[in-house]
Image (cartoon, helix red, strand yellow):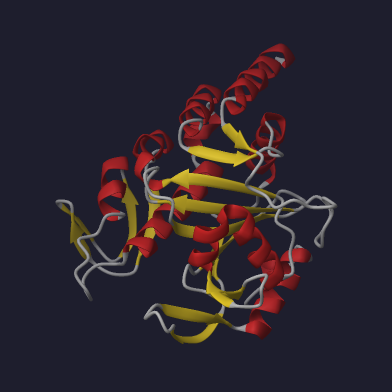
């Protein structure tokens, strides 16, 4: 039994080793230490529409507690107004366009007072096969919409890979369709949920196939090596007490329009600070109560 389990873990390690890694996704740091509970993890997940476009469409912080019992996903508005290193206000999307993932890491760390341990980039348009492997993804659709030949009712919807691709490419009819970024956020959150909860992933061969697929769909920072990925996945599958990750939208307090005509949202400084403290203390179970 031990030999079989060891062989399965070894196979997963080989598959995780095939995932692309980049040393340029995190900013240069003098120390790897930062605020937060020892053993907890914060990952910045950035979703892009396609490999041909360098602009981000989804950003979120995935927090894993030190006990590996719960996962909390904080959704970051792309239009969020943050402070650049030169003191000027910039939308989060502009920070990514100007400085890539390291710039967003710096802005998110400054905003929330947390430490981002890892970064993952993914491409929404390549997720269809992964979704089918996971056995559909569940989303909470806020409005009925018809696009790509499919009708998506309001409420809980389970999407196949093909349906998910149609859902993230709405026709764009104002007041009738979700905007592209919101639809992609919902699907990416659904994928994160299924990666953590799908019964299909109790089968080691399915896990290997998923990791093999991820090798072409994701890039992570150089510090998130194969061993760390496999250990994190196994720990969460064995220890998690959640039926699904908790999803939170970063608290905002109104907004406006820039001189260039771009809309922006302002962070609710008091609630954002409280959220940061909850993340650092592994106290997300009580957040919002």
Image quadrant where residue 72 sits: bottom right
Res. 242 visible in picture: no
* Residue drawn at point x = 65 percent, y = 81 percent: 271
Residue 166 visible in rendering: yes
Q: Is residue 276 left or right of residue 48?
A: right
Is 100 positioned to the left or the right of 34 in the image? Answer: left
**Which quarter of the picture shows residue 181?**
bottom left
Q: Nearer the viewer, residue 91 or 41?
A: 91
Query: Looking at the picture, does residue 180 appear above or below residue 233?
Result: below
Q: Nearer the viewer, residue 94 or 123?
A: 94
Q: Is residue 13 above or below residue 122?
A: above
Where in the figure is residue 71, as x and y percent of width and height? 63, 55
The x, y position of residue 192, in whole percent, is 51, 48
Foreground of the two, 232 or 96 = 96
- In which quadrant is the N terminus drawn? top right
Name the outermost residue toward the left. Answer: 149
Q: Residue at x 49, y 59 (%)?
A: 97
Q: Position of residue 116 (x, y in %)?
A: 70, 56
Q: Considering the image in quadrants, where does the C terminus appear? A: bottom right
Location of residue 159 in the rendering, given as x and y in whole percent from the top left corner: 32, 48
């Amino acid at each position: 039994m031990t030999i079989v389990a060891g062989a399965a873990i070894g196979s997963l390690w080989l598959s995780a080793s095939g995932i692309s890694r980049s040393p340029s996704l995190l900013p240069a740091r003098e120390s790897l230490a930062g605020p937060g509970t020892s053993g907890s993890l914060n990952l910045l997940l950035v979703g892009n529409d396609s490999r041909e476009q360098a602009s981000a469409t989804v950003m979120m912080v995935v927090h894993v507690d030190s006990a590996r019992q719960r996962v909390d996903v904080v959704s970051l508005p792309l239009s969020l107004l943050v402070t650049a290193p030169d003191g000027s206000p910039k939308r989060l999307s502009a920070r990514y366009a100007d400085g890539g993932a390291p710039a967003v890491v710096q802005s998110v760390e400054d905003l929330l007072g947390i430490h981002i341990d890892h970064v993952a980039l993914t491409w929404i348009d390549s997720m269809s096969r992964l979704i089918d492997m996971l056995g559909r993804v569940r989303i909470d659709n806020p409005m009925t919409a018809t696009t790509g030949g499919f009708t998506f009712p309001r409420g809980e919807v389970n999407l196949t890979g093909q349906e998910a691709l149609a859902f993230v490419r709405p026709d764009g009819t104002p007041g009738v369709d979700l905007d592209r970024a919101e639809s992609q956020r919902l699907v990416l959150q659904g994928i994160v949920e299924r990666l953590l909860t799908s019964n299909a992933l109790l089968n080691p061969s399915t896990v290997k196939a998923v990791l093999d697929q991820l090798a072409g769909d994701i890039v992570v920072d150089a510090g998130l090596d194969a061993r760390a990925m496999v250990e994190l996945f196994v720990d969460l599958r064995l220890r998690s007490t959640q039926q699904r990750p908790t999803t939170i939208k970063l608290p905002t307090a109104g907004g406006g329009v820039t001189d260039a005509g771009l809309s922006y949202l302002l962070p609710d400084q008091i609630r954002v600070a409280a959220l940061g403290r909850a993340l650092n203390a592994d106290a997300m179970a009580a957040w919002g109560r």
